[in-house]
Amino acid sequence: MKQAVYSSRTADKFVVRLPDGMRERIAEVARNHHRSMNSEIIARLEQSLLQEGALGDDLNMRLDSPELSLHERELLQRFRHLAHRQQNALIALIAQDSEAGKEED
């Protein structure tokens, strides 16, 4: 995946209010990934936006599609009944597990 190159002088700035403890969590994760906090936040936002775009395509799949097995239909149907926040949390969990698997290889 190609990341956009930008200058800190020309980059759009946006103030975010973080809940207690989140700044420290981001700092720790950024250190583990050998990135600045800013780079870590941008990487995670990009990943989330990409997943949401891919999710939109997947959600358009019809339950009666011959490409889906019975189990896949059931999972898709249950996924669609989740709140948007729950869908995003599940996707993030799966992506996190996928990234952990790549690091082990």
Image (cartoon, grey):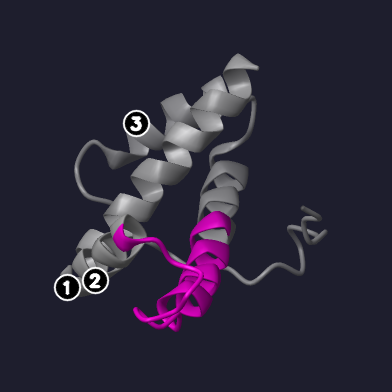
Q: Secondary structure at mark 1?
A: helix
Q: Secondary structure at mark 3?
A: helix
Indicate the amino acid at tag 1.
His
CA neighbours of label 1 inside 10 A, class few (<14), some (14 to 19), many (20+): few
The quarter of the rendered structure image containing the C terminus is top right
Residue annotated with mark 2? 77
Residue 21 in view of the camera: yes
Indicate the amino acid at tag 3.
Glu
User: Where residue 67 appears, x then y in whole percent?
Assistant: 51, 69
Residue annotated with mark 1? 81
CA neighbours of label 3 inside 10 A, class few (<14), some (14 to 19), many (20+): few
Residue annotated with mark 3? 24
- Pick whichever, 80 or 90, lies toward us: 80
Q: Secondary structure at mark 2?
A: helix
CA–CA distance between discs 1 and 2?
Answer: 7 Å
CA–CA distance between discs 2 and 3?
Answer: 37 Å
Indicate the amino acid at tag 2.
Gln
Would you place residue 3 above or below residue 39 in this image? below
Residue under the image location 49 percent in, 60 percent down: 48
- Pick whichever, 34 or 48, lies toward us: 48
Range covered by the magenta-colored residues: 47-70
Residue under the image location 21 percent in, 60 percent down: 86
Would you place residue 42 above or below residue 63 in this image? above
In this rendering, the label closer to the viewer, 2 or 3: 2
Residue under the image location 47 percent in, 75 percent down: 66
CA–CA distance between discs 3 and 1?
Answer: 34 Å
In this rendering, the label closer to the viewer, 3 or 1: 1
Mark before the other along the chain sequence, 2 or 3: 3
Disc 1 + disc 2, Cβ < 8 Å: yes
